[in-house]
Image (cartoon, coloured by chain):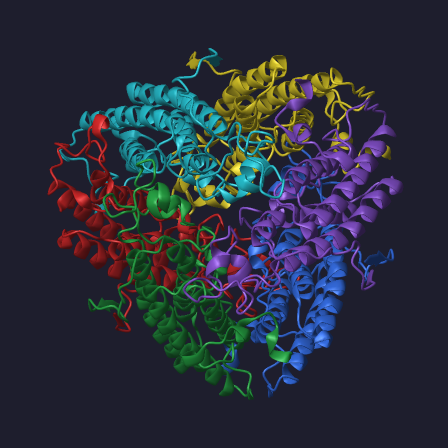
Chain colours: A purple, B blue, C green, D red, E cyan, F yellow
Amino acid sequence: MYFYKEDLINMIVPDKPDPAAAKVLQEALGGRFGEMRTMMQFSFQSANFRGKAKPYRDLIRGIFLEEISHVELVQTTINQLLNGSGEEGVGNVGTDGAPLEDAVKEHANPHHYIMGAQSSLPVDAGGNPWTGAYVYSHGNLISDLLDNLVLESTGVLQKSRIYEMSSNKTFRETLAFLIVRDNAHQNAFAKALETLGVDWGKLFPIPNYDINMLTWASIMPNSILD
Amino acid sequence: MYFYKEDLINMIVPDKPDPAAAKVLQEALGGRFGEMRTMMQFSFQSANFRGKAKPYRDLIRGIFLEEISHVELVQTTINQLLNGSGEEGVGNVGTDGAPLEDAVKEHANPHHYIMGAQSSLPVDAGGNPWTGAYVYSHGNLISDLLDNLVLESTGVLQKSRIYEMSSNKTFRETLAFLIVRDNAHQNAFAKALETLGVDWGKLFPIPNYDINMLTWASIMPNSILD
Amino acid sequence: MYFYKEDLINMIVPDKPDPAAAKVLQEALGGRFGEMRTMMQFSFQSANFRGKAKPYRDLIRGIFLEEISHVELVQTTINQLLNGSGEEGVGNVGTDGAPLEDAVKEHANPHHYIMGAQSSLPVDAGGNPWTGAYVYSHGNLISDLLDNLVLESTGVLQKSRIYEMSSNKTFRETLAFLIVRDNAHQNAFAKALETLGVDWGKLFPIPNYDINMLTWASIMPNSILD
Amino acid sequence: MYFYKEDLINMIVPDKPDPAAAKVLQEALGGRFGEMRTMMQFSFQSANFRGKAKPYRDLIRGIFLEEISHVELVQTTINQLLNGSGEEGVGNVGTDGAPLEDAVKEHANPHHYIMGAQSSLPVDAGGNPWTGAYVYSHGNLISDLLDNLVLESTGVLQKSRIYEMSSNKTFRETLAFLIVRDNAHQNAFAKALETLGVDWGKLFPIPNYDINMLTWASIMPNSILD
Amino acid sequence: MYFYKEDLINMIVPDKPDPAAAKVLQEALGGRFGEMRTMMQFSFQSANFRGKAKPYRDLIRGIFLEEISHVELVQTTINQLLNGSGEEGVGNVGTDGAPLEDAVKEHANPHHYIMGAQSSLPVDAGGNPWTGAYVYSHGNLISDLLDNLVLESTGVLQKSRIYEMSSNKTFRETLAFLIVRDNAHQNAFAKALETLGVDWGKLFPIPNYDINMLTWASIMPNSILD
Amino acid sequence: MYFYKEDLINMIVPDKPDPAAAKVLQEALGGRFGEMRTMMQFSFQSANFRGKAKPYRDLIRGIFLEEISHVELVQTTINQLLNGSGEEGVGNVGTDGAPLEDAVKEHANPHHYIMGAQSSLPVDAGGNPWTGAYVYSHGNLISDLLDNLVLESTGVLQKSRIYEMSSNKTFRETLAFLIVRDNAHQNAFAKALETLGVDWGKLFPIPNYDINMLTWASIMPNSILD
């Protein structure tokens, strides 16, 4: 059974409205490697777990719990980025007097206004709805852990790229926090696989950078071997 | 933030394996009106909530919490229905010696074996993946509550029909429990709407029956006025 | 059987081309709460109707008929908004001489040109194709009527928000007409439910405004209780 | 504007319930080449029509009208095939006393019971929802007519195969009627193409231009006959 | 079995980065009438071919082979259009210092950066993933050839429209090359249909039977030429 | 550019028709981890490759070439499993004289007859169409290789389970061949990652068994640690 304490897992840093940032941040919520995927994948893997390897189940379920909070954090961040956009009397009224006219033309996702009333949606940066077909739960411990590793490291990779899409502080604080946590999970799944016999050498984390000095080169195509 | 106590929200009653029952029970997990929908819909509605009407937000978030446990309960029930099906040496071997041959021919969802290794999946009774397009969160309190009402009452309606699809005890115990809870939520949302001015008369619950004496007629097409 | 009189159900008011408006108006045609949904939902509900409650069936079928005309009206409006956009010699030629270059950069849906040749499409404002999964026809009169109520009131809610996305007269005339009709249907389904015992109080219409003086506040997030 | 006369376009021949036949007949309703596709394709093509070639528009719109009745006929036929299936006390009760148990095991689509309450659905024979991505309306008269030809002839091809899937009289009468009508439409579109010069004559390439001097006009809506 | 010679089927003409052109060119790769569709449709039609009409099978398989190269050509062209976009120190840095900020605002597909790292994707111009539902392989030679004709001629039609969306030379060279080849294939399928008697001659109806004596043979795979 | 030699990459072993086996074998063709996925994923990864690490690109492209043949092999195997099913006069006629009646009731995919005319389809074992959303090509060499490893090892895992679903020789020969090849690819990607610093220990292959003595236990849920 599940309990809740009213507290976001990380702070929301204030900055100005940014509908274009809200649109691309949706990838981290409803994308193929976003927080809804991690939450639901670990929900299925932990509930579907059989056999006696309880520590592995506990690991997966623990991260599942954290991912529920990540979903909430990204939802709240998107809402903050949309707050105050397209409102009358705040200098955002379209040239012809339609309050949402400029918002629509600022690379926003129109569903953020039509459906969400300036709120988050269960879709990715391109507007495609999240789908259960993303979930990997194949009942083989090594396969499941390997897929979790790919999932978390791709999460870091994507978020590092999304981070470069706006300098908005609300946007970047949430992404930086999630990158740190995804890296922790990437490591946790790598360590779990080490207990099963693998030695990763210097393979992880993906991409190879220091969070304090994100460099664009490290997330470029196939750059590792140039 | 979210916490977990290792305990299912309802018991799992033992009975024999039943892959056909597992297949149709998927509707209550990954269907358009299943528990993944309620969980994610209330997640989005509570996180997207603005304005001062905090009691309504708390109502929605409280049910969100319970739905996380419902997802876990249906996942576990499906797993139990699949346990022991298609196994060697348990009398289930196909006539030609292929352990899964009979399972495939017993109206099972083949993905329960190919992907899930006898486990639950994020799909409906027809095998269609769950989609974010199911979620309703439109930022208007009345609309959101009305859609929640339709969601919960349709949940009861569908589960009452699914209940008639097998007499397996594992299957029926979980469905009976969920019908009771969906009715409670149906009432909760109806009451919330009453505080906004509506008098429902005798409209609810849908369908009109006593859980202790389910009658087939009450879930027939448009039967209420015959 | 069905008959046709060549006449749109409402006039098309001329104004200048507006591909961005055409893109968002697609929500009212192929969106989850658009006219294709109402048309097909009432088609299924009326054809699937059993039992003796013929007046309810006639109500649903009557609105189905009107929705066929609504689909035609939105298709024609979108075409009018696209007419003359991106054409050579009308001042719309791209800076590099490619006639569609500017159109593509004016927040248009590129499929309006690639597929439609400046015509309407069976998709929503985000370009997602309409899907049969939107249709609700569950064979329980109260459930079906409640879902119709949510469908029509959400239609009004969405169209009120879309209305704020452009001041183009072609666009706004069609939306204003459809808002009036959706409100009429919202009321019709509410009244049908009243005959089954409910007293709505002041719950409807959603959102609460006078069409002659649309106010932005009335369609804001959860505004009713502030 | 559209009008209705309460009359099916063809009779329903009585026969016994047949859920497996109802399942495969869904292809003729919500499949890629079913009646929902023809109805919506001709709706879009006739509403999107520009240019002066009015007789072609009238042809397409006339068939659109007829297809509305075809949708209604297939819906009603599926309902008739489902009527009386899975009911208590009619000899269909499952061996364990669950009324729908046998229905589920008779190759039925479970959604016919869970959602439809023994009614038709907007899906195909495999349970996949109908999608707007099926619609072809490309604003070039020859292309549109050619695709209509493929659509109607594939409709005949598929229905001839579905016809062999059950000898149920309800099922076969509706299919035989639709095959005759699809053939009539197949011929109508072939004749329309003949008036444009087929033997193939100068029909191809589409669009008609010299690659060395691409002109925008040649790819405009239905421009060939202006 | 398949072999490869490292050589693109046409040259890549250099020009400046153009993310908006890359976005719309995706239609020619992953769209309903793009190169992935032609490649997979001819793969299925040639592998599924039965009967003795070998020259038709060879025709289809030959074009299948060419389409593999077309897929590669469009992938490479999109990559070239994305190369150098959004990079630090090349004058593309956003006003706030985020390297991808401008790219996101230049009508790019955000997934080109988040997933693809400036690379092609299996999606269309609207970002919808390619789907197997596009493939037509119906086991009737005339139907398959007719659909191929519609596919290739619609390919030309769409590419002619996309061609007008940018004057970028990288973009236009690839499109011009593909238009020529699609026309060649359009003609090849038209000629193949001529060998079957078109003017329409006795081409229709499909399949060839008398409704009063439906025979199974007439709807068998590619039976017309046996 | 691509060339073809008319020769399947492995033999087709004759056995009797088996529509149920054909249905589940579709997973190996159009499923999330089937041959269409490997073919298209390696097509995108090799065409999207940048940087100087040419041996890695050649590895991926070489496997891409082989996967084209695998797609052809599975298509042909499915066709062979469907040949002779549901035909008149071969003892398969339904009790009521409809040739396809029994086929429909033998756990077949009805689309194998309605669309395919007894031929393969671009769908999975549940009938869901293949989608471009399966493809992983993220422009980071380690991520791409890790995902390829998961893809190939999950391919083996799934095919080992599908293998247990029928003892039909046509079916099993193709699966056994593909399992061997998938294991070879699994190893090739593991070795490529070793050159980047990882030591896998005894992690691979997944699942751990000898192909000459498939044991059911090795593909059971999470069995490795029991």
Closer to us: D27 or C123? C123
Closer to us: A82 or A68? A82
> Residue E18 sits in which quadrant?
top left
Above/below status of D48 relative to A149: below
On the rendered structure, is F113 left or right of F168? left
Closer to us: A17 or E107? A17
Residue at 38% x, 62% y is D75
Residue E214 seen by the camera: no
Q: Quadrant of the N terminus of chain B?
A: bottom right
Residue at 41% x, 33% y is E37
> Residue C54 sits in which quadrant?
bottom left
Residue at 62% x, 40% y is E98
Please state the horizontal and vertical placement of residue C114, each as a whole percent of the image.
34, 42
Please state the horizontal and vertical placement of residue E210, each as a whole percent of the image.
21, 43
Count of labels in the image: 0
Above/below status of B48 relative to E169: below
On the rendered structure, is A9 left or right of C85? right
Please state the horizontal and vertical placement of residue C144, each as a whole percent of the image.
50, 72
Closer to us: B98 or B220? B220
Above/below status of A38 relative to C4: above
On the rendered structure, is B216 left or right of D178? right
Residue B39 seen by the camera: yes
Please state the horizontal and vertical placement of residue D197, each as a whole percent of the image.
11, 37
On the rendered structure, is D6 left or right of E69? left
